[in-house]
Amino acid sequence: MEIAKAVFAKVDANLRMENHIQEGAQIKYGDIAFHVYGSAISILTAERLVLNCMQRMSGIATKTNEYVKAIEGTNAKVIDTRKTTPNIRFLEKYAVTVGGGSNHRFGLYDMIMLKDNHIDFCGGITKAVNKVKEYLKANNLDLRIEVETRNLDNVKEALACDGIHRIMLDNFTPDKVKEAVDIIHKKYETEASGGITLETIRSYAETGVDFISVGALTHSVKSLDLSLKAEIG
């Protein structure tokens, strides 16, 4: 809804939008989201961009809400990833929050994530963490550090590294996530990631993990079918 409002205003400041539902509200077939009043030419100019944005973002919000509802009653939070459409990440991540999810980092600049390739190129978790600390100090930066782990030995190595903030448990089974969460024992934040679906997310949330990241919220979502119809007055 907010995106539609911004597009209409950009095309023609004289267009007037009257909302009939609130941002993030549940909808059903046949619901009218808003009326827009003004020049027919201006409305037609904005129509496709408004619909394209609303359809995709509504699809993301809807899918996110399904995941959020699936873990109600647990302490875990559903978060997104950087697997987004080029140039519109800010819109897609906004849609995740409309659906009740939370945003992970927006880019490389607001949190450091040491993933498998970084760790392998560097020669291990400890070496990679130490390199990051040196980089942050040399550049006078204050950024949180997340470390991806692939097994319990990785978890134990990451746990021994001071100065990190979150440990990602990548492609762990729920049982292994539970074991890792118990080992970490709240020393650092924990995040489960990798192939987690709507059918399996509850089992991950019940392990006590803090965050569950789901790339599917943005990389393969189905858009909602919306349309704009004319009323001549």
Image (cartoon, rainbow, N blue to C red):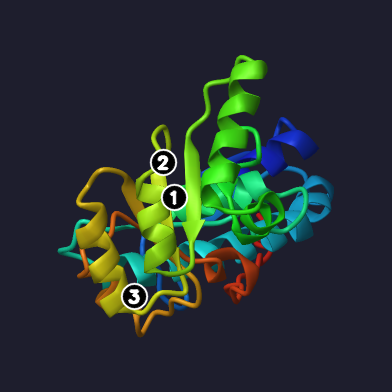
- Specify which label sits upstream in the sequence, 2 or 3: 2
Question: Neighbour class for label 3 at 10 Å: few (<14), some, many (≥20)?
Answer: many
- Measured from the top left, where is residue 25 in percent x and y? 37, 58
Q: Nearer the viewer, residue 199 or 22?
A: 199
Disc 3 from disc 1: Cα separation: 18 Å
- Looking at the picture, tell me which residue is in the foreground, 27 or 154: 154
Q: Position of residue 11 (x, y in %)?
A: 79, 39
Residue 155 vs residue 70, the one in the foreground: 155
Cα–Cα gap, marks 2 and 3: 29 Å
Q: Is residue 105 above or below residue 211?
A: above
Residue corresponding to mark 3: 201
- Please, what is the three-letter code of the amino acid marked with disc 2? Cys
Q: Is residue 71 left or right of residue 223?
A: left
Single out the residue that lies furthest toward the top. Answer: 140
Residue at image position (71%, 62%) is 52
Q: Which mark is residue 39?
A: none
Q: Earlier in the sequence, mark 1 or mark 2?
A: 1
* Amino acid type indicated by mark 3: Ile
Q: Position of residue 68 (x, y in %)?
A: 33, 64
Residue 33, image x and y in percent? 49, 59
Residue 233 vs 112, above or below: the answer is below
Tell me the SS state at disc 1: helix
Task: Tell me the kind of residue under disc 1.
Answer: Thr
Q: Which mark is residue 97?
A: 1
Secondary structure under tag 3 reads helix
Q: Residue at x 25, y 60 (%)?
A: 181
The residue wearing badge 2 is 161
Neighbour tally class for label 1: few under 14, some 14-19, many 20 plus, Cα within 10 Å = some
The quadrant in which residue 54 appears is: bottom right
Instruction: State the residue at coordinates (49%, 50%).
Output: 147
Question: Which tag, 3 or 1, sits closer to the chain's start?
Answer: 1
The quadrant holding residue 15 is top right
